[in-house]
Amino acid sequence: MSLSINKFRRRLLWLLIPIIFAITIHLKWDNWFYNPPEPAYFPSSVPDRILLTWSEDPCITRDVTWQCDTASKIGLLQFFNATSAKDTIVLPSSRRVIKTSGGAAAYYRVGIKDLKSGQKYSYRVGNEGKWSDWNTFKTCSSSDSAYSFIFIGDVQDSINGKSGDLFRKAYASLPDAAFMLFIGDMIERPHDEYWKEFFREGGEIFRTIPVVASPGNHEYHKAIIQKIDPRWMAHFSFPQNGPKDFLGRVCYWDYDDTRYISMDTNGMQGICSSLSQRNWLKKVLENTKQRWKVVIMHHPLYSTTRGQDYFIERALFKPLFDKYSVDLVLQGHDHAYGRSAHIPNSAFPEKQGPVYVVTHASPKLYDIKFTKEMDRLGTNTQMYQLIKVSKDSICYRAYTFEGTYYDGFTIVKNNAGTNKVIDYAPYDVKENLTPTPDFFRRYSKKEIEKYNEEMKEREKEKLRH
């Protein structure tokens, strides 16, 4: 009798598996696979969406990209040394037309090389006699012993949003920033209207200081095998030193004595693509001689959002971060703030491991989970970060949209290469742990009570320390 019951249970299980699978696909179809139709768009005949970045040596080169309508066939860049007032130089651009369901646009790119360090340059771009305004940038000085940059997480703003206010606050706080770094999900979805919004928000800042970025999942078109929006590849011009299938998005660049390594975690869509990035990362870290190592990647190794756990990224990358002494890992995706400096170093238990940061600047707010892995948490908060790098330290400071100093730490490296992390989180600013408005709609009364208990326990734990 028991044998018959077990046989029935097995048959029932095999029947339930495809039913559960079908129900899951039905419920998650829009989230996983649906791409809303792209509205029609009509690019300007005047150069638009001008972006300053680099694909080679950050001290003596700059790349400029821009967009225009497809009627123009020729793109030019004019520039001159504003410090020494030398003659204007004219450079031709490459041209690429990208067609989507909403329309078509032409994208242009020019690389400026052999610049002088510590000098100001002015440039403008033109198509068929229609020119942009003049813009100015400054190259880094070879004598500088320190530099700073602005770090911003997921933007994902709505149309006519307010992210531009956050960009301007960050830039006003650090007008001499060497560059602005984004961690993916700069747009809500890969539609022209959202790219337009991103560049509207960046405005003059994007034309004045270099912008560098790693891609996120919202720069990808949803599908079983997702593909990155070709406009991401057209707008950003980065070093071509990554794996063959990830050129221009998985890469590294050296700024002063720091090596920055950009990963494409959303591009890890199978064993081959995942191992391709891991093996490339291992080779890069093995051959890194720079004093500091900073990794940027969209999906975090340690999540700050309820119901999320990125164990694949953690299994692939954490052993390498520990073995090769990565100092700082900058991440996004989870729209809740978190910072950890006490996660054990699996390769060298006696050493300080990387500091992990998860942050965002989006008006979309996710529900936080109380994880002891994080030394500092925050929800209901849009953030920007200012980071200063010198020979002996990396000084990190995080601010809320309103400009409140929310979190900080400094990594100090001694002559032997050993790190010490000093916590500078403000004592007079409590962690913002209040649930998001959406939380009370999504969860039951019992789960809300559990959240409040966890929040109180977290607050008590912070007081004890």
Image (cartoon, rainbow, N blue to C red):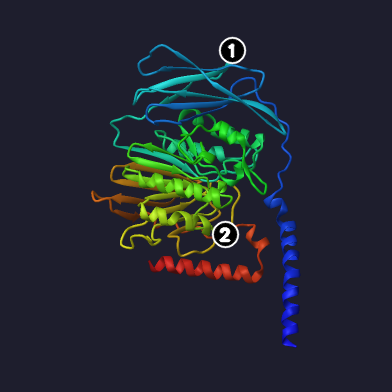
Does residue 157 show up?
Answer: no
The correct choice, above or below, for 147 with respect to 7 in the image is: above
The correct choice, above or below, for 154 with respect to 58 in the image is: below
Mark 2 lies on residue: 308
From the viewer's side, name the closer residue of 99 and 300.
Answer: 99
Q: Which mark is residue 129?
A: 1
Amino acid type at mark 2: Gln
Answer left or right for 455 relative to 58: right
Q: Quadrant of the C terminus?
A: bottom left
From the viewer's side, name the closer residue of 62 and 421.
Answer: 62
Does residue 396 show up?
Answer: yes
Q: Quadrant of residue 366?
A: bottom right
The correct choice, above or below, for 238 with respect to 93 in the image is: below
Counting residues from the start of the chain, the first of labels 1 and 2 encountered is 1
Q: Quadrant of the N terminus?
A: bottom right
Dot 2 alpha-carbon crowd within 10 angstroms: few under 14, some 14 to 19, many 20 or more: few
